[in-house]
Each structure stands twice: as C-alpha cells, then as structure tokens.
Image (spheres, grey):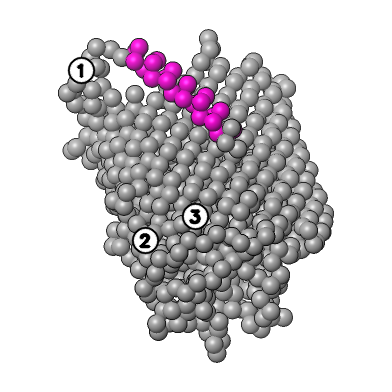
C-alpha cells in the first residue's frame, strides 16, 4: 500500500510544482505589489445543485427525480468548514449517528435505518467505497443523498439511502488554492487544490488535492493525524469517446474513544447514566484506530450516434485497519466504577471490486418519447476480519484514569467472508409531451454470501415505477413504488452468533411528493413515504436475529438555494412514525426501532452584507429528537439541539483572492447523547472553534 501512496504523492508533487511555476510566469507586476488590498463580494457557488449523479438519475435535474433527494453543495461545505460525512449530512432530514460517536469515522443511519458501510456509500454514482475510515471531503464537489430503496441500480443495499460523493474535476478556469485550518485544541491541517486543462483543445483535465493534518477534537488522551492524496483525470479522446479516472488514497490514525455499553435491563427498563463530560475519554491515548483506504474508478463513455451511447465502468476500493476498540461495561451508576474491555484487531481488510456496463438510448417522438437504460453490474466484496483477543481493566465513568498500554497476546483468529452481487436491469423513462412522465424499471439479481461457516444464495426480481406530472415547468408532482433487496446483516463481534449472516430480505417503498423551484433558485421538496422492511433484534440469548417486519412512514421537507442575492439557506425536517409490526414478538411489537427519532430538523443560513462587500455571516441549528436505545424501547436517549455560528470574509491581498473564516460548532458547549444502537450509547463533541485561511493563486 505504501508504494502506491508514494507514487501518487510524487506525481502530485510534480503537478504542484508545475502549477506554481505556471502561476509565477503569469504574474503581472501589479499583482506582485505588496500592500494592495481590494474587497470583493464574489460568490463561487450555490446552495442548490442543478443536477444529481446518483442511481439511474445521473445528470438529471433534482426537479425531475421522482424520489426524495438532497444535495449538499461545495458552497455549503465551505460555509460550514465541513470535512466529514456527518458534518455534511446533518443538513439533510433524518440523519443520525449510529453506534459510534464519530471520533474515528461516521457510522450513520437515515430515517432510523443503518447506511450499510460497504454498499451504500458511492463515489461518482458508481464505486461502493468502504466507510470504515473517515472519508475526506476536501476533494469532493458535493455530497448527494438519494433517500429510500435503490436496488434497481445498486443491487443488495438497505433502503436507508445512497450517500454519493462527487469529486472535483478540472473546469475551464484553472484552480490553484492553498488553505490552512486549525481549532483551539491544536488540531490543524493544510490543503492544496490544483486544477488545469491541457491540450490544443483542452481535451485533458487534471484536478489534484493534497491534505495533511494533525487531529485533536478536544477530548482527553486523544491525538492523531490524517492525510489525503487524490487525482481526478479526464480525457476527451474524440468527439464520441471520453475517459474519466479517479484515484484517491487517504489515511487516518487517531485515538478511539470508548463506547459506553448499556447495562442489563431490570424490570423491563435500562437505567442510563447521566451524560458525562464530552471531553472525558475512557480509553487510553495509545488505543489507536489506524486505517487507510485506496479507491480507483475508471469510466468510459462512447457515443454510438445521436441517440445512443455506451457507458463502461470499473473500480476497486480497499480499506485496511488495525484497531484497539474498547467498550465500558458493568458499571455502577452511583460510583461510576466499571470495566473497560478492549478488543484487539490487526490486519483487517475489506475490498470491493465493481463493474458496470450500460447501454443508453433515446427514442424521440412527437407525442411520446423514451429514454432507455439497459445495464449489468457485478460487485464482489471480500473481507477478512481478524481478532487478536481482549483484555479487561478497571475504569471509572466519572473520574477516568489513564489506561496503561497493552499489546495483543492471543493468536489471531481470522473470519473471511465473500459476497458476489450480480444483476441485470432495464428502465424506460417515457415522456408524454411536456407535462407527464412515466418511469418503469426492473432488476434481476443473483446474490451469494459466504463465510467460513455459512453460505447462502438468493435470486430476486425487483420492480420500480414512478409517475410524474409537471403542471408548470418549475413544479413537479410524483408518486413512486420501489422494491429493494438487502442483506439482513452479519452478527457483530459482541453477539453470541458473531459472524453469522442472516438471510436477505425485500423492502417495499411507496412515496408521493412535490418539488418546486422558487425565488432566486430555491428548491422546495415535500414528500410522504412508507417503507416496510424486515427488522433485526438481539434475542434473550444475545443472538443477532431477524425480528419480523418494521414500517417507517412520515413526511419529509427540504429547502435549499438562494432566496436573494444576499441570503442563502439549506433546511430540512422529518416527521416520522416508525413501528415494528412483528406480532410474534411481544417484547418489540408496536415499539419504535432502535436509534430512530420521530423528529429531526436543521436550518443553516448565510447572509452576505451589502454594506461590507466580501463579508458573510452564518448560523445553523440542528435538532434530533429522542431515540430508543434498543428495539424493546427499554430506555431512550434525549433529543438535542446544537447551534453553529460562522463568518467568512473574502478580499484580495496582493492581487490574490483570500478568504478568512471562523466557525463555532456546538455554541452552547452542550453535553448530550449523540448516538445509540447495537447496545451502545455515545457522547457528542464539545464546543469547537475552527479558523481557516484560503488563498487562490
């Protein structure tokens, strides 16, 4: 892995040197004069995206997508100084942390349904990247979420939604920028972003991003670092043939905070401790989470004629991890005394290999036209989970002590697994004039899953259909029905049947909604959804098992874009009723699925002051309602609201566009339970002040 990173870094270093030389040769004498200060009110982007690149809706306007979709644009990410997935996705309704508190990577649920870490996260609408190490956002143009079932295009994935990350690419205008960021705890990073087009007809493009940084989040006994090296390359070989290649390698090595395990139930309820100080760490600084990922994606587009084209894609995603995971358990609520159990894992590997072939065509007609898609996907997922034993040591919830460093002593126990997910799909988007559109599709899947002890296979055929009506050009009304197929999951390491694979399951989703573009370009969305899916549970023998059916239904609202030239916003809200419909299990029947809030909401707005050109002030409020800690609803973690404040000032120093920024998250320094699930609860992050400076050359 290290040679791969070294080669990438060398190439990027050359590109950086070349871009600096290019910049220096094009400087004018006026630009070199020091002391020249010019203010500017220029804005680079928008809070609303003009297209999405996820599922069969690639390069389609959000208004024409008959399903709930949210896009967090580069402008929003910059305004919030967001560098991780949860920082981006907190702007979309129904998103919560699950199981872990995010100090190492973001384990996320949408509408109470877990976003599966090996299938639901996609790069450029295609490659399933492995979300087991923080996915950096510095090289991403936007983050998209397609809510609900998505099996037509992506095969076996849960109906939580697809999180798609679109990479930055070289545009017509050259880009050379350098940014530094720091927080009050000593965390700091440096980021270089370079983009150029080359050739007589600018047929070649390259976008390079490099990041290095020291990690500190204000938690005791926490330290670490992270790096990113990425390249997005493209080549328009002929008028009809083009290629795109994405390469990224990133690494993060940090201390992992201990998870707090639930106490056993007594009398049908679980007693929860008071929320501890967010700055406390029950684990030792040496208990590192050391992971790295390499993602490669190649796309080829070939135009067969005016109305037909072929798309071919191939990619590989690989993640490697060493981990010292710890959980605090069997503690006294009175004294705080308990046991910290640490799990050693060395040499864990996950690898996804993905191929896609598509034939796309248009059959025009005076009254009716067809947009056809025929495709085949193959996704192979291989993994080796390795356990190197555990050790227990005393710890105290209220007065944590420093844990002396320990090393694995047990012989490694490997648990290999392999998944083969293949599928053929077809879709027809039929337009009847300017107002009506009918979309119908079907997928035939062949799925095989193998571990060292179990093996099963499944064949599924899943349909989807949607009807859309546009009374006027800027308003669309739709109704859709989608069937999705998913893995039911694998028993976690802390369960009696650890490693066991459950049988696959079919989810059914119905949705009606309306979308409209108003004002200066604000996209408004409202939708009612109803999802039925098999659920899982932990039984009396501490086994991870299927648990009948769960239903998730509710209303979701969203708005994003520019209200005026001065004011931009992104907002969302979810009102949901989720219930387990498993009459055979009295302990969970009629209860809310674990970690599922009935209400969530967010609002972030930025105002650019006309009186002070270049200055923008922002504020955000983010709310998550109370959530049950398990399917039996034996306890609930309280809802919470956090606030953020920010300011950006853009000017020109010595002829260079320069931006200064400050962002304060969790303004009130609130201590709160941020996550639940799989028998764990976790604490949110303390108040954090981030400051940054960026120069465009």
Asked whether 261 falls inside the magenta stretch, the response is no
Name the one closer to the observer, 300 or 578: 300
Q: Quadrant of the N terminus?
A: top right
Image disc number at residue 220: 2
Q: Quadrant of the C terminus?
A: top left
Name the one closer to the observer, 604 or 333: 333
Residue holding disc 1: 33
> How far separated are the C-alphas under marks 3 and 1?
48 Å
Q: Residue at x 43, y 58 (%)?
A: 285
Left or right: 459, with 1 as reference point: right
Q: Residue at x 36, y 31 (%)?
A: 178
Q: Earlier in the sequence, mark 1 or mark 2?
A: 1
Q: Secondary structure at mark 3?
A: strand
Magenta part of the chain: 4-26
Pointers 3 and 2 in contact (C-beta within 8 Å): no
Image disc number at residue 288: 3
Image disc number at residue 596: none
Position in image of residue 30 (x %, y %): 23, 14
> How far separated are the C-alphas under marks 1 and 2?
46 Å
């Amino acid at each position: 892995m290290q040679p791969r990173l070294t080669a990438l870094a060398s190439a990027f270093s050359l590109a950086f040197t070349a871009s600096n030389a290019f910049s220096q040769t094009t400087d004018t004498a006026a630009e070199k004069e020091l002391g020249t200060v010019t203010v500017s009110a220029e804005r680079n982007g928008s809070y609303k995206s003009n297209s999405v690149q996820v599922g069969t809706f690639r390069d389609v306007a959000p208004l024409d997508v008959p399903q709930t979709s949210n896009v967090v644009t580069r402008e929003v990410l910059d305004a919030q100084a967001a560098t991780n997935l949860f920082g981006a996705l907190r702007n979309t309704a129904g998103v919560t942390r699950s199981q872990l508190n995010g100090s190492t990577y973001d384990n996320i649920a949408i509408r109470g349904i877990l976003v599966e870490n090996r299938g639901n996260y996609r790069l450029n609408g295609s490659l399933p990247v492995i979300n087991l190490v923080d996915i950096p956002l510095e090289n991403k143009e936007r983050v998209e979420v397609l809510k609900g079932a998505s099996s037509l295009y992506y095969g076996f994935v849960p109906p939580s939604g697809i999180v798609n990350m679109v990479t930055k690419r070289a545009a017509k205008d050259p880009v050379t920028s350098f940014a530094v960021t720091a927080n009050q705890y000593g965390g700091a990073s440096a980021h270089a972003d370079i983009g150029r087009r080359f050739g007589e007809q600018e047929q070649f493009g390259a976008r390079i991003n490099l990041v290095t940084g020291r990690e500190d989040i204000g938690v005791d006994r926490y330290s670490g670092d992270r790096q990113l090296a990425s390249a997005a390359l493209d080549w328009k070989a002929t008028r009809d043939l083009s290629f795109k290649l994405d390469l990224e390698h990133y690494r993060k090595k940090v201390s992992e905070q201990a998870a707090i395990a639930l106490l056993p139930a007594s009398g049908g309820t679980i007693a929860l401790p008071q929320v501890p100080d967010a700055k406390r760490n029950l684990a030792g600084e040496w208990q590192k989470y050391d992971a790295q990922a390499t993602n490669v994606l190649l796309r080829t587009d070939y135009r067969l004629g005016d109305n037909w084209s072929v798309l071919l894609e191939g990619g590989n995603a690989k993640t490697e991890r060493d981990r010292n995971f710890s959980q605090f358990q069997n503690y006294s609520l009175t004294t705080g005394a308990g046991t910290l159990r640490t799990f050693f894992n060395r040499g864990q590997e996950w690898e996804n290999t993905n191929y896609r072939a598509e034939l796309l065509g248009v059959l025009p007609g005076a009254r009716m036209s067809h947009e056809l898609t025929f495709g085949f996907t193959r996704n192979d997922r291989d993994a080796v989970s390795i356990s190197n034993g555990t050790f227990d040591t005393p710890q105290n919830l209220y007065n944590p002590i420093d844990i002396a460093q320990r090393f694995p002593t047990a012989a490694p126990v490997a648990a290999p697994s392999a998944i083969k997910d293949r599928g053929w799909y077809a879709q027809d988007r039929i337009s009847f004039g300017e107002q009506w559109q009918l979309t119908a599709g079907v997928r035939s899947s062949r799925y095989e899953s193998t571990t060292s002890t179990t093996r099963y296979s499944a064949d599924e055929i899943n349909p989807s259909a949607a009807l859309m009506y546009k009374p006027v050009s800027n308003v669309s009304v739709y109704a859709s029905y989608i069937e999705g197929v998913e893995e039911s999951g694998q028993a976690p390491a802390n369960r009696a049947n650890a490693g066991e694979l459950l049988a696959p399951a079919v989810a059914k989703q119905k949705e009606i909604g309306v979308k409209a573009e108003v004002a200066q370009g604000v996209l408004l969305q409202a939708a009612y959804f109803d999802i039925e899916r098999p659920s899982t549970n932990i039984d009396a023998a501490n086994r991870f098992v299927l648990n009948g059916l769960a239903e998730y239904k509710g209303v979701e609202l969203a708005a994003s874009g520019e209200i005026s030239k001065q004011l931009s916003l992104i907002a969302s809200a979810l009102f949901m009723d989720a219930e387990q419909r498993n009459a055979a299990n009295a302990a969970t029947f009629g209860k809310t699925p674990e970690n599922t809030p009935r209400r969530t909401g967010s609002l972030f707005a930025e105002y650019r002051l006309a009186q002070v050109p270049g200055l923008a002030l922002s504020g955000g409020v983010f709310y998550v309602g109370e959530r049950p800690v398990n399917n039996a609803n034996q306890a609930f973690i309280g809802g919470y609201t956090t606030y953020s404040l920010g300011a950006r000032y853009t000017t020109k120093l010595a002829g260079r566009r320069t931006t200064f920024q400050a962002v304060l998250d969790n303004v009130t320094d609130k201590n709160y339970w941020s996550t639940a699930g799989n028998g764990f609860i976790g604490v949110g992050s303390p108040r954090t002040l981030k400051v940054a400076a960026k120069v465009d050359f």
